[in-house]
Image (cartoon, rainbow, N blue to C red):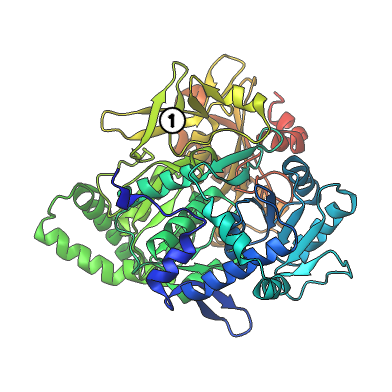
């Protein structure tokens, strides 16, 4: 690899970019009062990183110390992150929705003495931990409206900035920064723990250097003309690695603080890039289909025609770099004008370049539908342990295959074990888990990292995932079931919001289904089905029969033992707050089985 393509060490990145871009905007934050986006220049970012770095030295930060960042997305946590790296220390990001026991575990495990927090919720949780912790001694509050509750040890981010501005310790900061090397431990990222206690994934500078380098090759189209909405939690490796890549490329990053506001903020920003998860597109898909149901028969016919035209044009020609017939091109131009542009405008996708998507399985029908609209979805696969991407589609719709998770990234070695497990090697793969030799011994074999995912590679180097190995289960008849595949199938139905497949050591497969309630209410209204409550609606015989018919149709091409024999409609969604989803919105199967034990047992009564 040429030296010129070697990424800048993260400890030096903001300063090198400030030299390059000066007063050009690096980050943008939303002023909640005026509902406007405020830019922060590269020069200002570099200045604040310097002051926070000096402030941290003044309050006693040592080299190689683990520093926690417990906050939703804010510009300040990006600045704090770079200041920690510049001090030759380690940042440990924590999910903003974490509870006191979750924070306490990580504080103990990583021996965190200093913690940045975003808003009052995080401060209160941190204070609960601090009362009994032998490690946590100081909390730095970012939001100036946080009530510090007269704790003299704690301080505001702004006061740390002022302390650094007047501190006479530039030489110490510069000396620490000069020690920056590829072997620096940059982050400890704790997994959300679907099957046990969280594990701290260690990511070094060489992991991030490798990730940035291979993404610059695969996603060469990303330039400093782009804008990116920072929507997913920066705590998660997907958004974190993506944000580092964007800043390295000079992309202007808009920091979305509250995920719930994304429908509004994306309309305000109209970004060209944005990391997404399949859940985001499932909701877009459901919203489009729901809107279609309200159209007149004539408009519905136009919509259906446009989707079919888009499917042929984008999937049969544009995807394969084939020139479409003139008549098809003209039809597509008309379909864009009548339908696609309106959808993109309503969804904030007018300036769309491409949107990376990863984190879980994206249903093939939804993937195909989104591409048919001319929305360039770069679907991929990765893990915290692989510094995000292992494989992904090429941008600009180049030869992607629906059903795959894209071509394997350059410099990432992938092989399939005799048991069908995806194994990884390369510069982006973690060195291991923090203080967990037991987990390291279990997760590595002859230098290969065991992903826990089952899959295969085709002749064109496209990667496919069949399921999580730990999620695979056997029925009482000895047949293997891949629950994620079945859940993905059902999620394609616009009346289905969430699914949990059940069947381990059972006679047959069943499902817990959370309906898409808004869509279901429209269906009930159109079919004169009376109800006084959600519970009454989902137990109505006509609704049960309707779902039964939809499920049978959706599963008809599967083997008999894979088909869902019984199901239960639930009145409430699975949530993180109920402990049924991880921070990355993955299903906690053991918890679901425990919470709904009685309902599950009823489905197996003869």
Which residue is nearer to you in this view: 29 or 316? 29
Task: Return the x and y of residue 292 as percentages of the image width and height.
Answer: 42, 63
Task: Return the x and y of residue 110 as percentages of the image width and height.
Answer: 72, 43
Quadrant of the image for the N terminus?
Answer: top left
435 above or below 119?
Answer: above
Which residue is nearer to you in this view: 267 or 507? 267
| Numbered-mark total | 1
Quadrant of the image for the C terminus?
Answer: top right
Q: State the residue position of label 1.
A: 425
Q: Quadrant of residue 558?
A: top left
In the rendered view, does 89 fall on the left or right side of 331?
A: right
Q: Residue at x 71, y 35 (%)?
A: 197
Task: Return the x and y of residue 440 as percentages of the image width and height.
Answer: 60, 27
Residue at the far bottom in the pictured view? 34
502 above or below 30?
Answer: above
Q: Residue at x 48, y 75 (%)?
A: 43
In the rendered view, does 461 fall on the left or right side of 382?
A: left
Q: Residue at x 27, y 51 (%)?
A: 397
Task: Return the x and y of residue 450 as percentages of the image width and height.
Answer: 51, 26
Which residue is nearer to you in this view: 432 or 143? 432
Q: Quadrant of residue 407?
A: top left
50 above or below 236?
Answer: below
């Amino acid at each position: 690899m040429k030296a010129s393509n070697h990424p800048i060490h993260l400890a030096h990145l903001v300063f090198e970019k400030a030299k390059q871009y000066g007063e050009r905007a690096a980050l943008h934050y939303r002023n909640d009062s005026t509902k406007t986006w405020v830019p922060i220049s590269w020069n200002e970012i570099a200045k604040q990183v310097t002051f926070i770095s000096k402030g941290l030295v003044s309050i006693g930060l040592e080299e190689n110390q683990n520093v926690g960042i417990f906050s939703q997305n804010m510009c300040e946590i990006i600045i704090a992150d770079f200041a920690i790296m510049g001090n030759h220390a380690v940042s440990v990001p924590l999910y903003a929705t974490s509870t006191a026991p979750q924070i306490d575990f990580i504080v103990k495990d990583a021996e965190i003495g200093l913690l940045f927090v975003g808003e009052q919720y995080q401060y209160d949780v941190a204070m609960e931990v601090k009362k009994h912790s032998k490690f946590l001694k100081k909390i730095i509050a970012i939001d100036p409206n946080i009530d510090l509750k007269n704790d003299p040890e704690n301080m505001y981010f702004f006061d740390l900035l002022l302390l650094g501005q007047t501190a006479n310790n530039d030489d110490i900061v510069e000396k620490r920064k000069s020690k920056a090397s590829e072997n620096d431990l940059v982050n400890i990222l704790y997994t959300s723990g679907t099957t046990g206690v969280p594990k701290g994934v260690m990511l070094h500078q060489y992991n991030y250097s490798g990730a940035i380098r291979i993404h610059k090759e695969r996603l060469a189209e990303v330039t400093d003309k782009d804008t990116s909405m920072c929507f997913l939690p920066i705590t998660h490796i997907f958004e974190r690695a993506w944000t580092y890549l964007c800043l390295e490329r000079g992309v202007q990053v808009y920091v979305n603080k509250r995920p719930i506001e994304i429908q509004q903020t994306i309309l305000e920003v109209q970004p060209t890039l944005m990391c997404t998860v399949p859940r985001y597109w499932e909701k877009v898909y459901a919203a489009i289909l729901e809107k279609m149901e309200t159209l007149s028969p004539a408009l519905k016919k136009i919509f259906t025609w446009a989707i079919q035209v888009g499917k042929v044009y984008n999937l049969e020609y544009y995807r394969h770099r084939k020139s479409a017939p003139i008549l098809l091109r003209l039809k597509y131009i008309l379909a864009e004008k009548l339908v696609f542009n309106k959808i993109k405008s309503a969804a904030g996708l007018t300036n769309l370049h491409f949107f990376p998507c990863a984190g879980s399985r994206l249903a093939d029908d939804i993937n195909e539908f989104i591409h048919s609209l001319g929305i360039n979805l770069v679907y991929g696969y990765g893990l915290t342990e692989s510094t995000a991407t292992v494989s992904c589609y090429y941008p600009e719709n180049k030869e992607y295959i629906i059903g795959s998770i894209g071509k394997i990234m350059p410099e990432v070695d992938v092989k399939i074990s005799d048991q069908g497990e995806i194994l990884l090697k390369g510069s982006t793969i973690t060195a291991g888990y923090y203080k967990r030799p037991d987990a390291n011994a279990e997760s590595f074999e002859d230098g290969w990292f065991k992903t826990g995912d089952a899959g295969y590679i085709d002749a064109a180097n496209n990667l496919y995932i069949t399921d999580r190995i730990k999620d695979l289960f056997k029925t009482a008849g000895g047949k293997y079931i891949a629950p994620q595949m079945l859940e993905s199938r059902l999620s394609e139905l616009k009346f289905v919001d969430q699914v949990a497949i059940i069947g381990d050591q059972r006679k047959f497969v069943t499902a817990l289904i959370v309906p898409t309630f808004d869509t279901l209410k429209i269906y009930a209204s159109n079919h004169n089905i009376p109800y006084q409550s959600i519970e009454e609606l989902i137990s109505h015989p006509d609704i049960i029969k309707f779902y039964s018919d939809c499920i049978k149709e959706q599963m008809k091409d599967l083997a008999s033992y894979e088909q869902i024999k019984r199901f239960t409609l639930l009145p409430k969604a699975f949530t993180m707050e109920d402990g049924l989803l991880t921070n990355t919105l993955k299903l906690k199967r053991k918890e679901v089985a425990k919470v709904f034990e009685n309902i599950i047992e009823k489905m197996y009564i003869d």
